[in-house]
Amino acid sequence: MHRLDFSHERDLSIDDLVRRVESYYPEANFPLLRKAYEFAEKAHKGQKRRSGEDFIIHPLNVALTVGKLRMDLDSIIAGMLHDVIEDCDIAPEVIEQEFSSNIAQIVVGLTKISKIKFKTREESQAENFRKMIVAMAKDLRVIIVKLADRMHNMRTLQYISDGRQKSIAQETLDIYIPLASRLGINSVKGELEDLCLRFLKPDIYYQLAEKVAMKKSERDVYIREVVDLIQEKLQEYSLTAEVKGRPKHFYSIYKKMTARDVDFEQIQDILAFRLIVSNITECYKALGIIHSSFTPIPGRFKDYIAIPKVNNYQSLHTTVVGPKAERIEIQVRTTEMDQVAETGVAAHWRYKEGAASIPSKLGWVQELLEFNYDLKNNSEFMDIVKNDLDVGGIFIFTPNGDVRELRHGSTPLDFAYAVHTEIGNSCVGAKINGKMVPIRSRLKSGDTVEILTSKNQTPSKDWLNIVKTSRARSKIRQWLQKAEREINRDAGISILDKGLRVFSSSIKALKKKNMWNGVLEQFHCKSEDELYVNLGSGKLSIKDIISKTFPPEGDEQESEKKMEVIESYSEKLSQKARQKSSKKNAIIVDGMDDLMVRMARCCNPIPGDQVIGYITRGRGITVHTHQCNRINAREVSREIDVSWNEEFSFTHPVNIRVVTHDKPGVLSLISRRINEININIRSATAKSMPDRKGSFLFEIEVKDYSELLKVINSIEALEEVISVTRI
Ligand code: MN
């Protein structure tokens, strides 16, 4: 099928459209299609486009685009009628009577989307996105027709004002392209991206266009040469394939240039070749032939056949050194995979009618929908949408060989949450391909990741800055909210308890006197817990509760005094509660909040060490010990005072080296000693040394320096031990 042409066809007629649809779908109901044309033509009579053309050329082109995606007739007709409700005041019932309820439903969905006013403010955008997903969830064909509509509008964008051009292009980039990508409609995605580049960054676009065009004839010769060469090699092994080559989309060249920060001249692999074969075995066979005929570039081979992308894309990708030492990208796939690659979910409706429901492979749409009802916060929803629409993930293996797909940039913490919420919540570290790494390391496709957990571990706010996947983020938020609620609840109970005691009463007494429900009602609390939580969080004041429950009587001065006692107690407690819940870093940096802080790897400080912060470029603050050699070599102007957060309780990994007399069983002796004082050992390695000595490296988890000292002292006390050093 290869790159569909979505150009605006200004002379397109209904006869052309019928002929084109006939070519792939001869049994379609053409009288109905012609009827739709006549209906739209009549409805839009007299309306003009900005280009001066009759309006009908727009729905005709949209219907054609839907046809190019090989969609069913309902969708093509909906494309033809997509603007009649909005622009011509045709009632949905009329469409239902004249055509069908399915077609009417798609047109209604399209009208709804067109009424959404996209705003730049993220919050309203989220709301719109949500509406759009709701609109398309009823019938996914809505979004496919909408993409066709957008494609044609982008294709004819030059006729409208500059300002509108930019805002429509931006909206396309923000909303429609991620959707097209997620739905796997790559032909539409690639075209829209190039069009966005043209209107959003015209300088770059035309520069690229010029450069790509400049060497066109030279390049065409080269492409032919490579195609012939590949064909020749394949024939040697009696393999037939369709082979095509083309320059990549401008946008993908542009992305490469910005990602690698290089000029056009330095981008080598701007040519892509595609081999279409008839079955999977031939795909791998063809790949083998390619790799034995050209030198493959290491690390560039991807097998999306064995592990398809989340949008069901399948293909083999590789980059090789072609003739004249040019790097060329080669994709190998079957005809069927090629259709899916170009038209994504649209392939689901190919040549068939009445498949309106969401295909089971698109469960994510359903998930997204269910998800959005739980979320109060729009920007949170936006996060999730943006994340989940971001295709192009990495594949990570569990130690058992199961595969999970995560988005680029994911960390072991994301992986832990992908495996199970509990594993995420108790994650203390991870091993990537058998090597210990911090939880914020970046994962690469193909990594095998083992998550280390600890019963004492709990999520912290800091983790929100580490994770990249929406699943992990929302699970961490959930946990933090629950934890904060519990802290507030406990604080609320003791505030109320104390307050009532001062007035010689108690919660129990209130309940006995049947006053309790009255209190809840008066303060609009649906449950006992809600009252405590509000009290602990400071939403309700204990003073209000007491004064309403025990109206002042007798000695005014005395009750005033009592009130003061209660208030100061409550203030202290709820403040403490708030402090507790806002503890997020092991380190406090003077006067600054929300800073990214990490422990230097060279000296690996733990609480109790004297520490100094060092401001790094773009990576927040690194904390070193005063003794660290590295810190001396640094610029003094970048140093900053930091201290340990005493509220923070968290175990830190520390390495210690133990040198012993070489005696049997000494490793287990030391391990037992460490375990006896309840210290967790993460790893232990042994090395034999000359002079009949043994050397062991332990990675242990301690809360602070004093705990480390305890460990060192108790190991040193062993007769077999010569020395213990922290490293
Ligand atoms: Mn339209």
Image (spheres, helix red, strand yellow):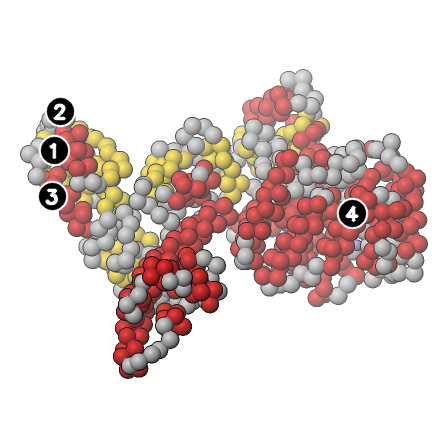
Residue 115 percent across, percent down from the top left:
73, 59
* In this view, the mark in front (1 or 2): 2
Q: CA distance from mark 2 to mark 4?
A: 79 Å
Which residue sits at x=16%, y=43%?
Answer: 711
Whichever of labels 1 and 4 marks the residue nearer the N terminus, that label is 4
* In this view, the mark in front (2 or 4): 4
- Give, as a three-letter code, the residue at label 1: Thr
Whichever of labels 3 and 2 marks the residue nearer the N terminus, that label is 2
Viewer-nearest residue: 478 or 460: 478
Q: CA distance from mark 1 to mark 2?
A: 11 Å
Marks 3 and 2 in Cβ contact (< 8 Å): no
Viewer-nearest residue: 513 or 699: 513
**Callout 1: 10 Å neighbours few (<14), some, many (20+)?**
many
| Residue ID for mark 2 | 664
Q: CA distance from mark 1 to mark 4?
A: 79 Å
| Residue ID for mark 1 | 660
**Callout 3: 10 Å neighbours few (<14), some, many (20+)?**
few
As displayed, is residue 560 above or below residue 47?
below
Instruction: State the SS at label 2.
Output: loop
Instruction: State the SS at label 1.
Output: strand
Q: Is residue 677 at all visible to an observer of this figure?
A: yes
Whichever of labels 2 and 4 marks the residue nearer the N terminus, that label is 4
